[in-house]
Image: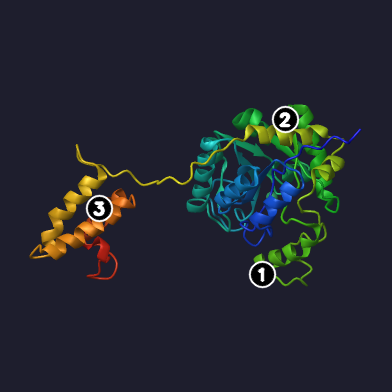
Amino acid sequence: MAKKKVEFTHLHVHSEYSLLDGLSKIKPLVAKAKELGMKSLALTDHGAMYGAIKFYNTCKEEGIKPIIGCEIYVARRSRFDKETKVDSDNFHLVLLAKNLEGYRNLMKIVTKAHLEGFYYKPRADMELIKEYHKGLIASTACLEGEIPSLIIQNQYEKAKEKAKEFLEIFGDDFYLEIQHHPKIPRQEIANKGIIQLSRELGIPLVATNDSHYIEPEDAEAQDVLLAIQTQKTVNDPNRLSMINSPDFYLRSPEEMAEIFKDYPEAIKNTQEIAEKCNLEIPLGQKVYPSFPLPEGETAESYLRKLTYERLPLRYKKITKEVKERVEYELDIIIKMGYAEYFLIVQDLVNWAKSQGIRVGREGEVRPDLSFLIF
Ligand SMILES: [Zn+2]
Ligand SMILES: [Zn+2]
């Protein structure tokens, strides 16, 4: 009888958009997942979502279900605390979007982490996680996650309290991550505590590989990236490096199943999570701020009206030639579906000018907008 194919999804994956940390380019990454027989794949870049749309589109093209996530940085205190030494260190946490609401919430968390929490890294905090948790799945991340960190520091009870806190926020959508990096002794300690937590609190396990590159032989190149990031030479023995454990590649489902054969549920749960994630991002639509139109007007009719109203401000005499030119330009703008866009731009440019705020170079107006601007 043929061996049953292992169903597994990688849910902790970095691409080159984990800047100077991840090596994998999106296209080969997705192609590799497909080659390995996976039906879905997550992207969890560090602190940012720059690669999300490219990844989403590439997966769709390849017939793979895209799971959009992020391995966020979590401030030790609040995201507003930025004290030397105390706050320079942070925790990792993996978040995955189940649906559009989750995707939007993830964008909010990541944006606020950049705008409000930036201190060495874009940091979210527990307040943001609580506020925007809807539609998101959380898992405890690598050894830099708060729960694994506490376990390693021999603070099991504190880790348990933290796990309860996440459980309260995420309920069934909270998972404990186990990884297998045998060259890193702390991983073994963390796994032991995590498995104990799973048993005591009934929180499901999930197996991940924290993939930073695609093939095993990419480990060295990724190590060079890391040296660039930390501004050290590769020969510096004290630098942050993952080269001693060259197993952060995209392991095959069979390899993952073999490694975690004592915890088959951790493999199975990757599929449970993949099934929970069904994000459809509406693309190819115009997303403009809505421009309030006077009653009875369409964007096209109002653009036309404003243009003719303001034409005498530009031309003393409206000759046949001017009229032909205006009609020609309006025709193109309207045909291309840009009427609303032009209304918005003229609004903000005119407002800026009315407030004495300089727009562009003094006296210069884009020629195709000139008839709309005072
Ligand atoms: Zn991490
Ligand atoms: Zn990671």
Q: In the rendered structure, which amino acid carries the disc numbered 2?
A: Ile
Q: Secondary structure at mark 1?
A: loop
Q: Which residue, as the protein is rendered here, is positioned at the far right?
A: 1
Q: Residue at x 71, y 55 (%)?
A: 212
Front-lying residue, 38 or 2 = 2
Residue 160 visible in this rendered orientation of the protein: no
Q: Is mark 3 within 8 Å of ligand 2?
A: no
Q: Residue at x 51, y 36 (%)?
A: 101
Query: Pointer 3: residues within 10 angstroms few (<14), some, or many (20+)?
Result: some
Q: CA distance from mark 3 to mark 1?
A: 46 Å
Q: Which residue is mark 2?
A: 203
Q: Amino acid at mark 1?
A: Gln
Quadrant containing the N terminus in the rendered view? top right
The picture places residue 153, in percent across and down from the top left corner, at 76, 46
Up-down relation of residue 367 to residue 166 (above or below):
below
Quadrant of the image occupied by residue 154: top right
Q: Residues within 10 Å of mark 1 (few under 14, many from 20)?
A: few
Name the secondary structure under disc 3: helix
Residue occupied by mark 3: 347
